[in-house]
Image: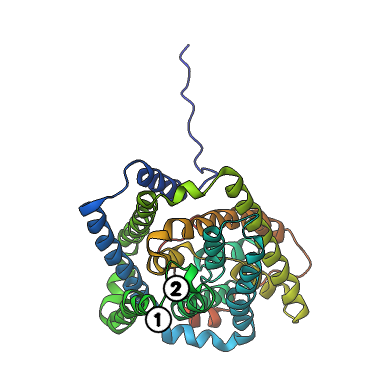
Amino acid sequence: MSRRIPRLPSRLPVDAYLLALAATVALAALLPARGTAADLAGGASTGAVALLLFLYGARLSTAEALDGLKHWRLHLTVLACTFVVFPLLGLASGGLVPYVLTPELQAGFLFLCLVPSTIQSSIAFTSIARGNVPAAICAGSFSSLAGILVTPLLAALLLGSTGGGFSADSLLKIVFQLLVPFLAGQLLRRWVGGFLTRHKKVLGPVDRGSILLVVYTAFSEGMVAGVWHQVTPARLGALLAAEAILLALMLTLSWYGARRLGFGRADRIAIQFAGSKKSLAAGLPMASVIFGAHASLAVLPLMLFHQMQLMVCAVLAKRRSRDHEEPPFRDDLAEAAACGPLSDPAVTVGSR
């Protein structure tokens, strides 16, 4: 009798793109770019970042997104979670240095608290939990749009010299590498927006490939500079514990805080999932500009937090879907139409 070859599960417990990220980090550890190769990789990474923001600007309809401000209290609550509460908790992590976190890891921990929220994963989890999906679309979109300006400004204010020598020159680089391509995409959206929408599946690998290139360049620079000798297994475990506490605090504060503000169940779900997330796709390009050669350590907390939030929120969303406290939210078609088909500049890890 012949044995049947066992099949791999159709859905892996870890997202395939996260595996690609891990493989990219391993490649940078084994074969880091040096010399001329490093210069070429750095130039390609800069171009990839500009491409990401251009595509984002070309896809995002600002006029439609601004129409979604009708639910302004919810959006302001999500923005407050993302750019006020998160940064305050990030600043509090300074007390963990040097006993729990190294200064470099704490700078990366603080940086993850400054980046905007995700869009696609917020929408996915809000939908699973039977929440206000149109509000999640708008809230995530406003957060990503605001993050292009707010995140670099907060980094300049809060990170200071710990951000790999963050200065006015770094802020100027961010304007040219992030804001200018985004605005160019907005200006050209009238002519290229339809093409990008029709070829969304084809351009998806371009987005994800750009992120992988940014990761490879950042971690290669870290390997060449020898920064990875600063991370011990004990420090890594401490970082994971600190991030678990951070995520638990934000999930709790966003849920019960929204209840105290008088939001209904459907809105609280949107606030919790949009207000507790951090975007890897938005954070990586900014980190490569802000931290330079120290970007590898700076993005490590963000990469770990991103996967942690996906796993925890997947379980939480399923629990919320069985909650019969209030009837499920019925999509407001007018609000959904106002927000439009918005998406992250790159496919968010684990959001598919």
Q: Is residue 103 above or below residue 71?
A: above
C-alpha gap between disc 1 and disc 2? 8 Å
Q: Which residue is mark 2?
A: 342
Q: Residue at x 20, y 54 (%)?
A: 36
Q: Amino acid at mark 2?
A: Leu
Tags 1 and 2 in contact by the CB under 8 Å rule?
A: yes
Give the amino acid at mark 1.
Answer: Ser
The 10 Å Cα crowd at callout 1, few under 14, some 14 to 19, many 20 or more, is some
Q: Give 51 or 29, whichever is nearer the viewer.
A: 29
Categorize mark 2 by other alpha carbons within 10 Å: few (<14), some (14-19), many (20+): some
Q: Is residue 260 above or below residue 222?
A: below
Q: Quadrant of residue 252?
A: bottom right
In front of the other: 207 or 34: 34
- Residue 208 in the image, given as x and y percentages of width and height: 37, 57
- How many marks can you see? 2
Question: Is residue 103 or residue 210 the one in the foreground?
Answer: 103
Is 107 left, or right, of 215 in this rendering?
right
Relative placement, left or right, of 6 versus 235 is: left
5 in relation to 91, above or below? above
Q: Is residue 264 above or below residue 225?
A: below
